[in-house]
Image: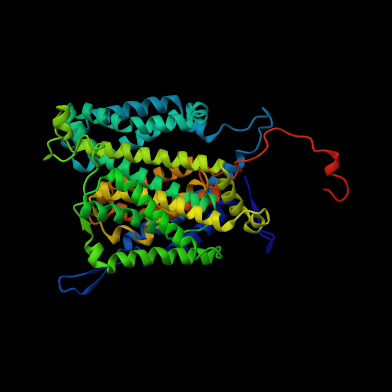
Amino acid sequence: MAVTVSPERDTVATPVQRATREALYAGAISLGLFVLFIGLKTGQNISNELVLTTRWGLLAAVVIATAVGRFLYVAYGQPFLANQKITDVATGLLPASVASRFFQLPAFIVAIIAAVLLFVFNNSLAGWVGAEPAGYLQFLRALAIIYVLACVIYYFRAFIHANFTKLGIAALVLYPILVVAVLSLSAWSIVGGLQGSLKWVDNFGIQILIYVMLAWGLNIVVGLAGLLDLGYVAFYAIGAYAYALLGTQYGLSFWILLPAAGAMAAFWGVLLGFPVLRLRGDYLAIVTLAFGEIIRLVLINWREVTHGSAGISGIPKVSFFGLMSFNVSDPNYIAKVLGIAQSGAYYKIFLYYLILGLCLLTAFVTIRLRRLPVGRAWEALREDEIACRSLGINTTTTKLTAFATGAMFGGFAGSFFAARQGFVSPESFVFLESAIILAIVVLGGMGSLVGIAVAAMVMIGGTEALRELDFLKQIFGPDFTPELYRMLLFGMAMVIVMLWKPRGFVGSREPTAFLKVRRAVSGSFTKEGHG
């Protein structure tokens, strides 16, 4: 067992003693941090007076959970991880990994059976055991499904690692089809499957892909060029309002306004780039933050054009390249043209494949640009701006192209967001959105497209999954809203990633241009005065 020797005293602290001390420290720190956020809640009564509500029980639960978690990690987690690196003297082998002991075949079979049974009898659970236990059983079903997927990923990890990109694209393409098929089998009706798929395709499909596209666009500015941009949501807003205004005022098609919104956002990206050419680090972040707030305030106060805080409604939907419409009243409505049952799921599925195509376009353009001279100039600028200038690279053009390209993809995502929502307002483009997008880039790994996509899926998908945890209200009370704690999850994820994966989930800073074959250097270059 590992022990700790205190330099002040000649005493030896066991892991349990050290864990107890650190657990008390963690509990005290969490008490100081959360007493105002969790212990006290402000509201207003019918007379519009401020009312202060105490939640000491919830605060105590959080503090105790923090202290117990720290105790278990220090007392048992750290010694266990240390023992995993010690070779057995008798066999000369390292201990079996945690994953090999956790993902066992019997447990895998039990999880499959539990998931199938709970899925088949999902509609009857509330009548058999009651509403409250049914919520716990649904949560158990979700855990069983997650365990089964984790086992599949573990057992086929070599194949998945070798073909990750192809498998990911295939899964994204088949996702709506699989959702509709599974829900149709559950409801024994195709119409029921289509209606039930609205939430899963929209909240867990389209929503995640929007943030993937935004994060990939910001990755060009932050991850490739190394320019910290805290006002990226401004380009998102410009694209959304460009489509909303031109679509409602002039009735132009989405397919015309999509490139127009991207071009307009790129134009404003260049305008932002000019004032910040000589700025770096914190100063650049402050200016870009100010730019994002300026755009938001303009949208609020320019009421003659933007309608202020009321926003713009009645934004036209996207048509299927002008051939079919998704409005029920139109003569070329998709259900009338194809002779199928009416459903609002058709539009959501079409939007899903549309944003998926835009994401793939963003990834393709980013990969190709990285291999061109402009992409290599971005990477040189990221590593060292002074060395970049000494190599003869025009840093002005390099920064402007980075801002313009990243802003263009933000404008594309904004126009799609306006078409999807049918309504835009300044409340959708606050600084918190920029912070979330930047957090996704950092968590995924700056410069890594795959890592950013995984981070968006985990963080945005996890936030949406919180809405499904209704059984938590039975534990913490009917007023408990799990989705409001999404920023706490962001903070926890960032701390965990920074401790164990400082470069992100799939972080990579390898240059795109390097010699793959060793070449001999002529002796004439290594003489005195030449090298």
Residue 423 in sight from this viewpoint: yes
Q: Position of residue 16 (x, y in %)?
A: 55, 52
- In this rendering, the answer to whether 526 lies above or below 439 is above
Q: Position of residue 121 (x, y in %)?
A: 22, 29
Quarter holding residue 363:
top left
Q: Position of residue 388 (x, y in %)?
A: 64, 54
The type of colouring in the image is: rainbow
Q: Residue at 52% x, 48% y: name it.
A: 446
452 left or right, relative to 324: right
Front residue of 344/327: it is: 327
Q: Position of residue 347 (x, y in %)?
A: 23, 38
Q: Please give the count of numbered marks on the rendered protein.
A: 0
Q: Residue at 54% x, 43% y: name it.
A: 370
- In this rendering, the answer to whether 458 lies above or below 395 is above
The quarter of the image holding the N terminus is: top right
- In this rendering, the answer to whether 15 lies above or below 6 is above
Residue 492 in sight from this viewpoint: no
389 left or right, relative to 68: right
Front residue of 118/351: it is: 351
Quarter holding residue 86:
top right
